[in-house]
Image: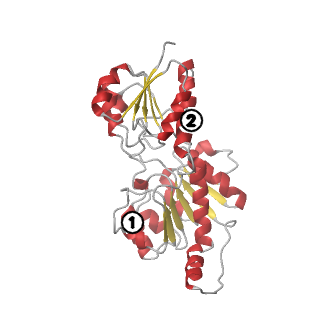
């Protein structure tokens, strides 16, 4: 194969992009955050790497100009923000960072469960006030966990919660794929979401944001939950109807929520979540372990090696499904 030209849409000085030095000799790398520069060199690109995690506009505006591109990759796991009509209609394959961040997200979810069961907020409050007051806590081992979206992240949650002795329920588009899965006690189709939620002590939303999943957990689903239930979102903010969740939290219809993602980010100043004592709030950083961006680039490098050899790519996105 002749030399490959890689075009990176993003800050060329970003520290994590230094790993691109490990690309095969002869690979031509052009990185820029200048729209004019990107427009100039786009027709020469064989591969486009979206190096921006938050602002997709450079990538989206560059793609239509890349007339010979054969593969595009986005470092993030979520792709809803980069799927322009041109990209969806194009036969050019897109891959993403799906699964790269599954371990820290799953650990955060389990940590959130322990936070509520052992009432860590109360412990901190009592310590700061200099108060010695014992109280009863709950064990995780006898709880039922419902996972909404049983993909890479959802399975990672199950892998970590099952050894505690938890019962694992999973909601997925094709529940038949879970037949024989030792981690799952029962799988449900989306049409039976209310039935599943009614049995859960914890609900972990780990689904992508698509037309089918936006607002999937809404007023009816909040109403189906136990008063002792806790909702955890480590997938995408729009999967949960935030006004419905806020109403459930304020009325104590449910016990609490642990949220790493939101419909609008950054969360606006004065948002109700900031002051809710029954909410554990993370600024979309549950997967920001040391070197998290480097890990995303490393997966791209592995896929680049497959591309250069003509081998099948991993994490090919179903652009019409949205993940």
Residue shown at 59%/80% (left/top)?
127
Q: Nearer the viewer, residue 252 or 96?
A: 96
Q: Nearer the viewer, residue 6 or 117?
A: 6
Residue at the outermost left position:
36
Which residue position holds label 2? 298
Q: CA distance from mark 2 to mark 1?
A: 39 Å
Q: Position of residue 36 (x, y in %)?
A: 27, 30
Sequence-earlier tag: 2 or 1 = 1
Q: Position of residue 168 (x, y in %)?
A: 64, 57
Q: Position of residue 26 (x, y in %)?
A: 51, 17
Q: Quadrant of residue 299?
A: top right
Residue shown at 47%/75% (left/top)?
277
Please, is residue 174 above or below residue 131 in the view?
above
Residue shown at 47%/38% (left/top)?
75
Residue 56 visible, this orientation? yes
Mark 1, Cα crowd under 10 Å, few <14 / some 14-19 / many 20+, is some
Q: Specify the label residue 244 is tagged with.
A: 1
Label 2, secondary structure: give it. Answer: helix
Please, is residue 175 above or below residue 249 in the view?
above
Q: Quadrant of residue 248?
A: bottom left
């Amino acid at each position: 194969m002749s030399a490959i030209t890689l075009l990176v849409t993003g800050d060329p000085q970003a520290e994590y992009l230094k790993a691109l030095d490990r690309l095969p000799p002869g690979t031509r790398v052009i990185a820029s955050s200048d729209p004019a520069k990107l427009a100039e060199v786009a027709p020469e690109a064989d591969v486009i790497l979206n190096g921006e995690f938050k602002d997709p506009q450079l990538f989206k505006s560059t793609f239509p100009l890349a007339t010979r591109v054969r593969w595009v990759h986005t470092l993030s796991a979520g792709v809803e923000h980069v799927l322009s009509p041109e990209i969806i209609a194009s036969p050019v394959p897109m891959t993403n960072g799906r699964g790269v961040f599954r371990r820290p997200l799953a650990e955060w979810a389990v940590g959130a469960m322990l936070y509520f069961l052992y009432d860590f907020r109360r412990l901190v409050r009592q310590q700061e006030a200099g108060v010695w007051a014992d109280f009863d806590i709950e064990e995780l081992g006898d709880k039922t966990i419902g996972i909404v979206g049983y993909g890479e992240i959802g399975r990672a949650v199950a892998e970590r919660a099952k050894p505690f002795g938890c019962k694992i329920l999973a909601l997925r588009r094709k529940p038949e794929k879970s037949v024989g899965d030792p981690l799952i006690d029962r799988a449900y189709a989306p049409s039976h979401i209310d039935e599943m939620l009614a049995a859960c002590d914890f609900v972990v939303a780990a689904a992508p944001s698509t037309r089918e999943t936006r607002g999937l957990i809404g007023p009816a689903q909040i109403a189906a939950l136990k008063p002792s239930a806790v909702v955890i979102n480590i997938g995408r903010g729009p999967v949960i109807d935030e006004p419905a969740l806020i109403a459930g939290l304020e009325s104590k219809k449910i016990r609490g929520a642990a949220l790493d993602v939101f419909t609008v980010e950054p969360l606006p100043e004065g948002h109700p979540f900031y002051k809710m004592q029954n909410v554990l709030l993370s600024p979309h950083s549950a997967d920001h372990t040391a070197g998290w961006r480097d890990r995303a680039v490393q997966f791209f490098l592995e896929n680049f090696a497959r591309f250069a050899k003509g081998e099948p790519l991993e994490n090919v996105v179903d652009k019409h499904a949205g993940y």
